[in-house]
Amino acid sequence: MTSKINFSPLVSVIMNCYNSDKYLVEAIESVLNQKYTNWEIVFWDNCSTDKSPEIVKSYNDKRINYYRGDELVTLGKARNFAIEKCKGEFISFLDCDDVWLQDKLKKQVPLFLDKKTDIVFSDTLFFNHKGKEWRLYKKKKYYVGKCFSKLISNYFLSLETVIVRKDSVLKQPYWFNEDYSVIEEADLFRRIAYNGGLDMVNEVLAKWRVHEESYTWRNINQLSLETEQMIKEYSEIYDNFEIEYKREINALRTRVLITEGKFYLETGKNKLARKLILGYKHKKSILYFIMFFLTFIPSKLLKLLFNLK
């Protein structure tokens, strides 16, 4: 049996980049500072026009592999290009505005000694430019083991913490869905979890930078549309999906409404929030009436009332 001491497989660190020079140095340095040293960076440049290529190429480390696409593509497609270049037995992800703590790989990789584990994650610290920080799992629930149903109803993973067994990715009918721009990783990790197990290190081993320039927030209007498309696709992949997971699907739709609606309200887009809520399928719920009422309150007043970020 392989011991934890002798278990040091190659970990591919995928960094997808599009005009990310603002925080890029900090992200790369956080990988270079890992105590676990058997890693490679697969850096996929999605046709950046800023100083990102110059920054990456300035590092004289053979473990950093720079690739540049021929044309600008969706994030899902760019992530798939990066996967094709991965040589590691395991794949991890670090967006160019996030950072890792030094012990991340050292503490997470040994959990893959359990062959039933296909995804390992950790706690993470969310932070913004105002200096506000909050630990993800201080209040949010997480689960380990077989978690497919929980990932449908209450998706709890944060990309910068996740490491996956590459074989579990390659077994999927498709990797990242190239039509998605917001839920591409949630979709992939859910599909892996349908048969695979999850484990976690209950420590903060990464930091996720919250800012409106992030790719996710710039495309938040796609959240509800992509979620409905995912539900449709799962109905085709998994037998009786919409019947067996009816409760989880309803919970998912509710969370999407809250996430997308809250973002619109925070950014003063009350009309967009109202349009989203009017299309909500469960109009008899208390949540529907509360959210609908909030769309008539100015965003400045909402921030005062609810201390929105």
Image (tube, rainbow, N blue to C red):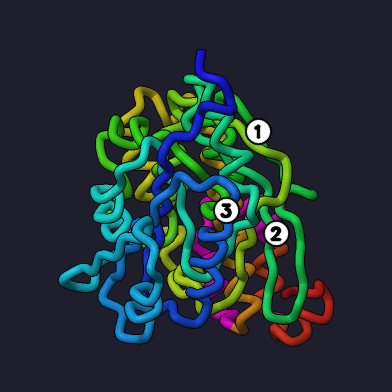
Question: Label 2: which residue?
Answer: 125
Q: Secondary structure at mark 2?
A: strand
Q: Secondary structure at mark 1?
A: loop
Q: Is residue 69 left or right of residue 217?
A: left
Give the residue displayed 58% in from the left and 75% down from the top: 264
Q: Which residues are magenta?
A: 269-289
The spot of residue 298 in percent (x, y) is 71, 85
* Labels 1 and 2 touching (C-beta < 8 A): no
Q: Is residue 117 above or below residue 208?
A: above
The spot of residue 74 in percent (x, y) is 29, 64
Question: Label 3: which residue?
Answer: 34
Q: Is residue 131 left or right of residue 65?
A: right
The spot of residue 106 in percent (x, y) is 60, 42
Question: Label 1: which residue?
Answer: 143
Q: Amino acid at mark 1?
A: Tyr
Q: Determine the image quadrant of residue 290.
A: bottom right
Task: Estimate the spatial distance between the alpha carbons at disc 2 and disc 3, rounded to whole Å.
Answer: 17 Å
Of circles 1 and 3, the one toward us is 3
Q: Amino acid at mark 2?
A: Leu
In this figure, what is the number of numbered marks? 3
Q: Earlier in the sequence, mark 2 or mark 3?
A: 3
Find the residue positioned furthest to the left.
70
Dominant secondary structure, magenta: helix
Q: Amino acid at mark 3?
A: Gln
